[in-house]
Amino acid sequence: MLITEVPEIDLFECLKYDRMRNNGQLLTYLPKPYSGYVHIQLCRTRVRYGWRPWFQAPCCRRRTSKLYICGSRIACRQCLDLKYPSQYRKDAFSRSMMAQHKLKRLEKQKRRLWNGDHPTRFGAQYKKLHAERVGQAVEILGDFGYCA
């Protein structure tokens, strides 16, 4: 099932409007088409600037910032086996477009790609994506009968 087809409970939206209980629970509303409130256990981790809150998934006790509602069950993405739409794109054209999008994002960040003669971490990622994009272009052309 796709992640876009299931109603979600977002932690930061909940913290904007709902009260945090002193025993580590959050009283949160359920999104439409559901109604009512539910108590969700919170946990936190230490970060540089203080503490970061997390939902503690009722199904597996995993930390997450989003929970999903499937029927009467509230669970994390892994337990409900939800997939992102991009995980279903298997054809060469879609993979090529995703690689191109990642390349543009890397170029837009204006990161340093080379340190002398050696690529930086971003340079290595850029080289890998560029080679992947070229390979996919050859595969696309082969599908249309342009390459031998």
Image: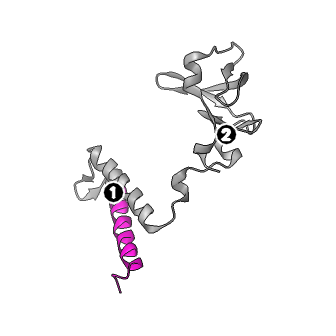
Between discs 1 and 2, the one toward the N terminus: 2
Question: Which of 94 and 57 lies nearest the eye of the viewer?
Answer: 94
Horizontal relation, residue 60 to residue 106: left or right? right
Front label number (1 vs 2): 2
Which residue position is annotated with label 1?
A: 126
Is 38 rendered above or below residue 129? above
The residue under the point 60% across, 34% down is 66
Q: Find residue 68 and report its image quarter.
A: top right
Residue flagged by tag 2: what amino acid is it?
A: Cys
What's the mark number on residue 76?
Answer: 2
Magenta segment, principal secondary structure? helix
What's the image's color scheme? one colour
In the rendered image, which quarter contains the C terminus? bottom left
> Is 66 colored magenta in this rendering?
no
Residue flagged by tag 1: what amino acid is it?
A: Tyr
Secondary element at image label 2: loop
Q: Is residue 74 visible?
A: yes
Q: Look at the image and give the residue range highlighted in magenta.
A: 125-148
> Is 141 colored magenta in this rendering?
yes
Name the residue at the left extreme: 116
Question: Which of 53 and 82 lies nearest the eye of the viewer?
Answer: 82
Q: Residue 44, percent across and down? A: 61, 25
Q: Residue 145, percent across and down? A: 37, 82
